Amino acid sequence: MQAAGLAQWFDADSIVSRDCTQPKPDPAGVQLVLSRWQASVDDAVMVGDYDFDLRAARAAGCLSVHLNVDDGQRWPEVTDLSVASLTELQRWFEADRRPSVPTS
């Protein structure tokens, strides 16, 4: 978080690493953050650039967003929305076009 210049935006309870819980694709990390934030999966979005991120989101029951950095890898079976940038994702939500999360 420090190296990316993002540490100022997150308190310590919001940061979950492999040392805190099972690694992705296990949904435990997503569930831990939701528990700490007292948030519902219905209000959660998991953004990731790899299969394990998307599988963790799907297993937790929240929206899975593939941040597709154009490396040719795709995981449509676990991707609810694919975007090329976080700006694109922001536009989706500003337009209130939230995709629904599959129930299966």
Image (cartoon, grey):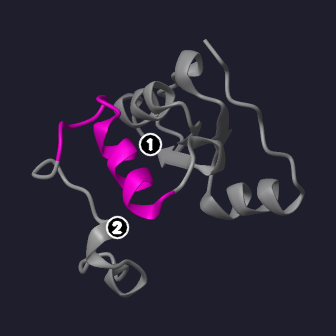
Q: Is residue 9 above or below residue 38?
A: below
At label 2, which amino acid type do we have?
Ser
x then y, percent, for residue 21: 17, 44
Residue underneath mark 2: 14
Instruction: Determine the residue positioned at 15% across, 52% down.
Output: 20
For residue 78, which numbered disc appears in the image? none
Choose between 51 and 20: the one closer to the eye: 20
Q: Quadrant of the N terminus?
A: bottom left
Q: Residue at x 68, y 29 (%)?
A: 101
The residue sitting at 39% across, 37% down in the picture is 53
**Residue that label 1 marks:** 49
Image height check: is 10 above or below 20? below
- Residue type at the position of mark 1: Asp
Question: Residue 71: percent from the left, percent from the top?
Answer: 46, 37
Q: Check disc 1 and report its element: helix, strand or loop.
A: loop
Quarter of the figure that contains the C terminus: top right
Q: Earlier in the sequence, mark 2 or mark 1?
A: 2
The residue that appears at 34% across and 83% down in the rendered structure is 5
| Residue depth check, mark 2 versus mark 1: number of the one nearer the observer | 2
Is residue 88 left or right of 17 when viewed as pictured?
A: right
In the visual, does 48 lie left or right of 29? right
Please provide percent x and percent y for residue 25.
31, 29
Q: Give the magenta range.
A: 21-38
